[in-house]
Image (cartoon, rainbow, N blue to C red):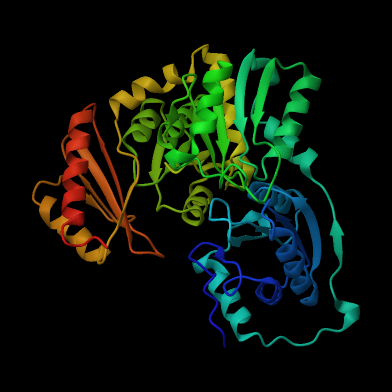
């Protein structure tokens, strides 16, 4: 039995060659089919050069297991979420490595109703079947079919259901698709704007899908990947900048000055907007940063509910609570009417509508919140002994902590600040987030102190 190292906690991701290739993809398809026994599965793939061949190998495995395959072609992960629910099929798989290096690829798997398949909900079972690789021969008459389809028009129809066309006033938007899968969807949205007479002007950069990523891997979470969007916003005097990762399940926003806005503050902005439409609703947030979100939700009459970090946990909690919206500081935004799944297209459309309705710039909409709840942003430290380092931080602060929470890693709260510290599932990395009440200097001071404790004799 060959151990497949491409199986991670929430998805499949591996270096091309030994970790992930067409043979492994075929086995994964067969294992998915054996485990779920689906009648029909929808497939899609991002712009990476290997996504098409991996997808076709995946399709062969699924067909060998007796499943019919519907291939929606070049797509983002959320298009698979949409197609799975819209077509009422038994599952879906997106071939994508999102923002990983160019020599990687992977897969994101869902079952019926676009429910995620992760380590606790079937991914380990699929891994075991793929590793054992002892599948029965299937009668050719029972082999599944393969068909190419498109649901993009229906998907864009759904996107537009989140905003009122009549609310949209003149705006100039810079949109950076990063040569990933977002470009064709942006083209379709632009076309809809034009046909409807919506006065929104889109300036597209790096819009054409190109798996060689001539402008770098699309990962706007990294500061070095933001320059092109920032420069274009300034050059064109745009009202907002939008940048996507490779499979566009996350969008990152820039204000009218080209300044990057942390996803954390967009969560609060969208939570408030949803509570205006759905008073008293529940809003899901993760434990890394939440002071701003909780304050916004409480003041708007909603109920803030904490969930463990990660899309599988957020989606499960969204369903349990029937929450209208959920958001993570990492720029994942989840929507009840989108099968409780995350979308990178819905958030920027909602924020564009807010700019028009509030008649304020993006900086004006978030400036007060950023000052009231300054945050460090996530800081990663590569350490020899992550758990030992976290214990040292806990021991240092435990006497003064007003509250300790272990929903995800450890969160410690004090009179005027708090932090969350957690280790990665897959690498020797510790992730730190610090925030305070209206005190930037205190936030910076505590961030520096915690990093000093973490790195004392423990960094690699």
In the picture, measured across the screen, residue 444 lies left or right of residue 183, that is left
Q: Residue at x 79, y 77 (%)?
A: 64
Snapshot quadrant of residue 214: top right
Q: Position of residue 257 (x, y in %)?
A: 46, 19
- In front: 227, or 165? 227
Q: Residue at x 22, y 35 (%)?
A: 443
Q: Is residue 263 above or below residue 367?
A: below
Q: Position of residue 83 (x, y in %)?
A: 73, 50
Snapshot quadrant of residue 178: top right
- The reply to whether residue 278 is in sight is no
Q: Position of residue 73 (x, y in %)?
A: 77, 52
Query: Considering the image in quadrants, where does the C terminus appear?
Result: bottom left
In the picture, measured across the screen, residue 129 lies left or right of residue 90, that is left
Query: Considering the image in quadrants, where does the N terminus appear?
Result: bottom right
Q: Is residue 296 above or below residue 333?
A: above
- In front: 297, or 389? 389
- In front: 354, or 200? 200
- In front: 105, or 291? 105
């Amino acid at each position: 039995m060959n151990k497949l190292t491409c199986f991670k906690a929430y998805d499949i991701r591996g270096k091309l060659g030994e970790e992930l290739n067409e043979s492994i993809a075929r086995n994964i398809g067969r294992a998915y089919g054996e485990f779920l026994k689906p009648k029909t599965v929808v497939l899609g793939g991002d712009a990476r050069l290997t996504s098409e061949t991996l997808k076709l190998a995946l399709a062969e495995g699924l067909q060998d297991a007796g499943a019919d395959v519907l291939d929606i072609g070049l797509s983002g992960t959320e298009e698979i979420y949409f197609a799975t629910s819209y077509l009422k099929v038994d599952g879906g798989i997106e071939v994508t490595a999102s923002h990983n290096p160019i020599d990687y690829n992977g897969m994101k798997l869902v079952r019926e109703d676009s429910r995620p398949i992760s380590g606790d909900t079937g991914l380990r079972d699929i891994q075991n079947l793929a590793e054992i690789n002892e599948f029965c021969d299937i009668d050719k008459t029972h082999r599944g079919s393969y068909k190419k389809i498109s649901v993009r028009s229906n998907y864009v129809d759904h996107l537009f259901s989140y905003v009122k066309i009549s609310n949209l006033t003149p705006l100039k938007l810079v949109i950076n698709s990063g040569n990933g899968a977002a470009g064709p969807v942006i083209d379709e949205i632009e076309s809809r704007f034009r046909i409807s007479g919506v006065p929104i002007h889109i300036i597209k950069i790096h819009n054409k899908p190109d798996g060689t990523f001539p402008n770098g891997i699309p990962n706007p979470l990294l500061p070095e990947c933001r320059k092109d969007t920032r420069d274009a916003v300034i050059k064109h005097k745009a009202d907002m900048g939008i940048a996507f990762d490779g499979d566009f399940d996350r969008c990152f926003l820039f204000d009218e000055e080209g300044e990057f806005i942390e996803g954390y503050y967009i969560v609060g902005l969208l939570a408030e907007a949803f509570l205006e439409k759905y008073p008293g609703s529940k809003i899901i947030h993760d434990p890394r940063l939440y002071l701003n979100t909780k304050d916004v939700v409480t003041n708007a009459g909603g109920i803030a509910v904490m969930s463990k970090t990660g899309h599988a946990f957020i989606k499960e909690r969204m369903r349990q609570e029937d929450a209208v919206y959920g958001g993570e500081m990492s720029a994942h935004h989840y929507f009840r009417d989108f099968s409780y799944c995350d979308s990178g297209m819905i958030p920027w459309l909602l924020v564009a509508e807010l700019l028009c309705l509030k008649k304020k710039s993006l900086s004006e909409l978030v400036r007060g919140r950023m000052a009231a709840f300054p945050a460090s942003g996530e800081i990663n430290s590569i350490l020899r002994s992550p758990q030992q380092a976290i214990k040292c931080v806990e021991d240092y602060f435990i006497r003064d902590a007003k509250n300790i929470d272990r929903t995800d890693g450890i969160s410690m709260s004090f009179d005027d600040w708090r932090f969350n510290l957690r280790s990665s599932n897959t690498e020797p990395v510790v992730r730190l987030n610090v925030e305070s009440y209206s005190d930037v200097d205190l936030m910076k001071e505590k961030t520096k102190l915690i990093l000093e404790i973490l790195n004392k004799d423990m960094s690699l």
